[in-house]
Structure formats: C-alpha cells, structure tokens
Amino acid sequence: MGDIGGERAAVQNPLIRYSVEAGWSHLPPDEAQRLRRGEDGLALNEIASDQLQRLNPGVVDLNRSLDILRRLSIVRPDIEGNLEAWEHFKGLRTVFLPEEKPERNIRLLNPDHPDTGSRVSLSSRATQSIPALDALRS
C-alpha cells in the first residue's frame, strides 16, 4: 500500500514542513538516530547536553549534563516516573556540586523565554519519540 492516506503523507510531512516554516531545523531520521546514540535512545544527546549547559551556566558541565540525561532516560514508565520527569522540567530536581558541597536546582526549560533555543523537527519515528527530550528549548 502506498502513501495515499498514510500517516507519513497526511500528518508527518505537513508537520515537518510547518515546523521548518516556523524556524525549526529539520532533522532526518539517520541524524536523529545518531544523536540518540541508537534506535532506543530517547534524547538528542549533543543538543540536549548543550542546552542543559547553556541553561545552567556554572552549574552544569558536560559530565553533569550527561548524568542528567542518563537519569531522565531511566525514569520509570509509571506515575512516579512521570512525577520525576515533571520535577526535572519544573526545575525542582538538583545536581550535586562537590566543589561547593550543596545541591543546586537545574533547569531544562526557560519558561520566561520559551521561543528561544534549539528547536528540532524530526522525520519518521515522530510518534515514537519523546518531544520534550527531543527538543529542549531555552
């Protein structure tokens, strides 16, 4: 069966086109898979790591950003896991700073300026991805 009436032609392609028109960058499936470090990866690691560091200067470095992404990737697929992920996005989760001893809150999003930052539109796998992790916006 062809693409006539299929999800790709009816839904995914128009969404990709609208996203690009709105200023988002198109990310082909092979590049998304590379950035996710395989088919089972949830986050676009390089983009998410850069965003975490930009949103949390002096608090989140490369190693801490990778640890945060690891922690997000292992949240349980239940109500408690949803709460944990929400707490990360709300800025309620912390990262320990051994040089200062305290834990500091981290931000995954900037609610004051949601229209700025990296915006990525994915091809394919769109229904299987986690949008909040795919495109962390500052």
Image (tube, rainbow, N blue to C red):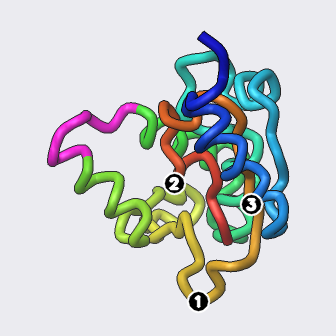
Q: Which numbered mark, 1 or 3, is in the foreground of this view? A: 3
Q: Which residue is mark 3?
A: 18
The quarter of the image holding the N terminus is top right
Question: Within 10 angstroms of label 3, few (less than 14), some, or many (20 or more) residues?
Answer: few
Tell me the quadrant of the picture where the C terminus can be found: bottom right
Looking at the rendered structure, the secondary structure element under dot 3 is helix
Which numbered disc, 1 or 3, marks the residue that appears first in the sequence? 3
- Can you identify the residue that label 2 sits on? 132
- Residue density around tag 2, few if under 14, some if 14–19, many if 20 or more, within 10 Å: some
Regarding mark 2 in the picture, which secondary structure is present there? helix
Residue sitting farthest toward the top:
1
**Residue 120 in picture, x, y percent from top left:** 74, 52
135 or 14, which is in the foreground? 14
User: What is the CA distance from the residue labelled 2 to the residue labelled 1?
Assistant: 17 Å
* Image: magenta residue range: 74-81
Give the residue furthest to the left: 79
Q: Amino acid at mark 1?
A: Asp
State the residue at coordinates (53%, 19%): 40
Name the residue at 33% across, 63% down: 87
Q: Crowding at label 1, few (<14), some or many (≥20) Cα neighbours within 10 Å?
A: few
Q: Look at the numbered disc 1 and give the secondary structure of its residue.
A: loop
What secondary structure prevails in the magenta region? loop
Q: Which mark is residue 13?
A: none
Magenta-colored stretch includes residue 75: yes
Residue at 80%, 60% in the rendered image: 24
**Is 53 left, or right, of 30 in this rendering?**
left
- Left or right of residue 71, residue 29 in this image: right
Which residue is at the far bottom? 112
Residue receiving disc 1: 112
From the viewer's perspective, is residue 59 above or below residue 79? below
